[in-house]
Image: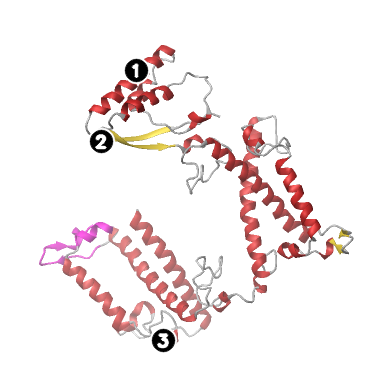
Amino acid sequence: FTPNFSLVDRMASKRYGAVGVGLAGAVAGSAFIAPGSQTKQGALRATRAAPQAASASASSASTASYAAASVVAASAGVLLTRRPGAMSKTTVTALQAFEQELGVQPPVGFWDPAGLSKDGDVEAFKRRRSVELKHGRIAMLATMGYITPEIAGKFPGYLSPSAGLKFADVPNGLAAISKVPAGGWTQILLYMGWCEVSRGPGSDIASGRPGDFGWYVLTSADPEQKKQKLNAELANGRLAMMAIIGMFYQDGLTGSAWGDWSLYTDSPLRAFENETGVQPPVGFWDPLGLSVSGNLSDYKRRREVELKHGRVAMFATIGYILPEYWRFPGYLSKFLDIKFSEVPNGLSAFSKVPALGWLQIVGFAGIVELNVYNEQVNDEPGNYGAGFLGLRSIGFMNAGIADPEVRKKKLNAELANGRLAMFAIIGMFFQ
């Protein structure tokens, strides 16, 4: 395959010095390659080319034209050395070298969040692709190995006649590791080693076809159908790698390959699984493990902070939307002659609100935080006895909600809406 490198961007900043001459000469030699010529792997790495060379490359395909273009590029390099403020910053997109490879599929396309391929190193890419395919294939077999004994049962007879160990005696999942005798593990490791080296280490990479070991299960005479099958293998292998790691975790925590939560009685999270906010579809969701200590005081403090932030975010989200349809009449600041209608919506409003206005806002927030809503009723996070929308604070009294189920539903709705509003307001800030 011949990767396609894109020269994205150049900006003028400094004089290059004498290095510009050598750079222009090297670029002139590598940027103009006659169509149909074979490219060595070393030339697949990202290179830098002057814009003058790029424009010259669009001319005739004859050898004479390429030679002339090389002279132009070299001359441009000499000129660059004499120009103060010449080009010094180059942004190179090397990832395009691999964007037509197998595994580049919707919805993410070429996905390399760790930037492993940013240097455009073809050999490293092939090695990683070979490793990815091997791990994916093993993970698919391992995932099926977890599932099959639960559904189809186990082999009849003995796993080890000398040890009197039947297949039926071997548990599923991680518990089987301690049951397989040492001789069995030796056989497994020797077979794995034979599979790895029987065709020669790295034979698939050397042939230029990572993962091709001469055993064709997913193949077709139709190139498009073959590509579709190989893409499916990669996608399924990636899914299987995630699946088997998930099964390991579930098995390790619960003793069951299927992660039966009822079996994980030692989990510190059980202290909070019946709290407000534990709702479908994720249940008790704590991906950062903030509650793993089981500390009730920390949990209540975080829940109170979550409720406060959610309530502020809900007001802020409405505050973004409402001015698009209606604004207060009159003046925001009579002294400074600023009307409400003159204050723009969104982040632009920061510069329009006078300093005294910000002082009032911050002062009001501090009073509410320190002197109004500072005692929790019944030690319940976020409950300050203020009622719906804090109406009790301004004299509108009500008896509250008597039905415990209705109250729990409404409190769950408040948490869910607050969480959504926190995401919404951050999205509005970015937009």
Quadrant of the image occupied by residue 229? top right
How packed mark 1 is, by other alpha carbons closer than 10 Å (few <14, some 14-19, many 20 or more), is some
Magenta-drawn stretch contains 332: yes
The location of residue 179, given as percent across then percent down, is 78, 64
Total labels: the figure holds 3
How busy is the neighbourhood of tag 2: few (under 14 within 10 Å), some, or many (20 plus)? some
Give the quadrant of the N terminus.
top right
Q: Secondary structure at mark 3?
A: helix
Above or below, 276 against 56 in this view is below
Q: Secondary structure at mark 2?
A: loop
Q: Secondary structure at mark 1?
A: helix
Residue position for label 3: 377
- Give the mark nearer the N terminus: 1 vs 2: 2
Residue 358 rendering spot, x and y as whole percentages: 21, 68
Residue holding disc 1: 71
Q: Is residue 163 magenta?
A: no
Q: Please report the bounds of the magenta region as a residue range.
A: 327-352
The residue at the point 12 percent across, 67 percent down is: 334
The image shows residue 359, relative to residue 4, as above or below, that is below
Q: Nearer the viewer, residue 203 or 369?
A: 203
Name the residue at 30% across, 85% down. 395
Mark 1 to mark 2 CA distance (whole Å): 23 Å
Q: Amino acid at mark 3?
A: Val
| Type of the residue with mark 2 | Lys
355 to 227, vertically: above or below? below
